[in-house]
Every structure is written in C-alpha cells, then in structure tokens.
Image (cartoon, grey):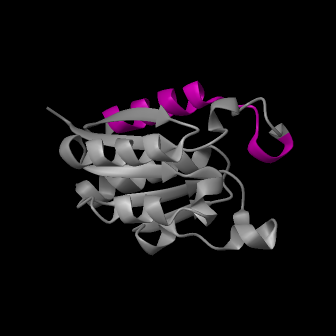
Amino acid sequence: MAQLITIINGPNLNLLGQRQPEIYGYDTLDDVAKSCADIAESLGLRSELMQSNHEGVLIDMIHTARQTSAGIIINPAALTHTSVALLDALHTFDGPVLEVHISNVHKRESFRHSSYVSLRADGVIAGFGVQGYSLAMQRMGTLLG
C-alpha cells in the first residue's frame, strides 16, 4: 500500500475560496485536496486532507499521523504564530514535515513573520497561493523517494 501523506489545515481554512480571496484566491480546500491527491498518486503516494478550527483537534490529527503517515504537510494558519502546543506535537512525529502558507507571510503584518512550526519543519513554502500545497506534495515525494 502506498505511503500516506497527511495534509493538516488550521483555523478558517474551511472558508478558503470565500474568505479574503484577494489574499487567498478562489480555490477551495476541496480543490486543494483533489490536486494533492492527483500529485500523490503520480508519485506512488496517497494523501488525506483534514481541517479544523480547533487547536486540540489539530494536535490529535498529528498524533494520529504518527501511526498512519509517512509525512505531514501542514498549514496551521494563525496558529503558526501562537501555538507551542502544535510545535510540541510535531516534535513527536518522525517523518518529514512541510509547512505551507498560501500568502507570503513576510509581506504581511509583523506578527506573521515568526512561526513556531518552522522550528520543526523540514521546509517552508509561502506565497505561492494554493500551488504551495502541490509544491509541498512534490517535495514530499522527493523526501520519501
């Protein structure tokens, strides 16, 4: 069976395509899931995309991924800048972790310039819109290949 890549999305990303499209674009999370699944399949991998607006649920997703997944792609959204708990959970995961941000966080408010998650991430992709997820999936294929 192909290795699983878990794609975890944080708060407000359920509104992707509706919320601030001038920043985040018009693609939905379902569009992202399909694109990632197609790329994963082409790489001999599988993907599962999940989203929650609740920090504890995101932590539970990471804990589950410890048992089920070869890699994690995570867009923690606003929790990027505030959640030591997400960082601690990611430190329990042995496989590669890639951090994705749809917008270029370094061109935005200064509080968005720091990331706790980056302290664990094996790579960070920011500012490429939802294409960042596709790039992360391709990189995951390289890391696991």
Q: Which residues are magenta?
A: 22-41
In the rendered view, tell whether residue 1 sits above or below residue 71: above
87 vs 97, nearest the viewer: 87
- Which residue shows up at 47% across the image and 51% down it? 74
Q: Is residue 118 magenta?
A: no
Residue 129 spot, x, y in % from top left: 68, 48
Residue at the image point whose x is 75% and y is 32% from the top: 26
Where the C terminus falls, by quadrant?
A: bottom left
Side of 77 where 85 appears, left or right? left
Depicted 61 relative to depicted 125: above or below: above
Q: Residue at coordinates 73% horizontally, 31% vertically from top-left?
A: 17
Q: 20 or 85: nearer the eye?
A: 85
Q: Which image quadrant is residue 24 in?
A: top right
**Quarter of the figure that contains the N terminus:** top left
Query: Which x, y percent locates residue 52?
Result: 53, 36
Q: Is residue 34 located in the magenta-colored stretch of the structure?
A: yes
Q: Within the image, what quadrant is residue 19 found in?
A: top right
Question: Residue 118 location in percent, x, y?
Answer: 50, 70
> Residue 44: x and y, percent?
25, 38
Residue at image coords 66%, 50%: 102
In-image side of 24 versus 98 (left or right): right
Principal secondary structure, stretch drawn in magenta: helix
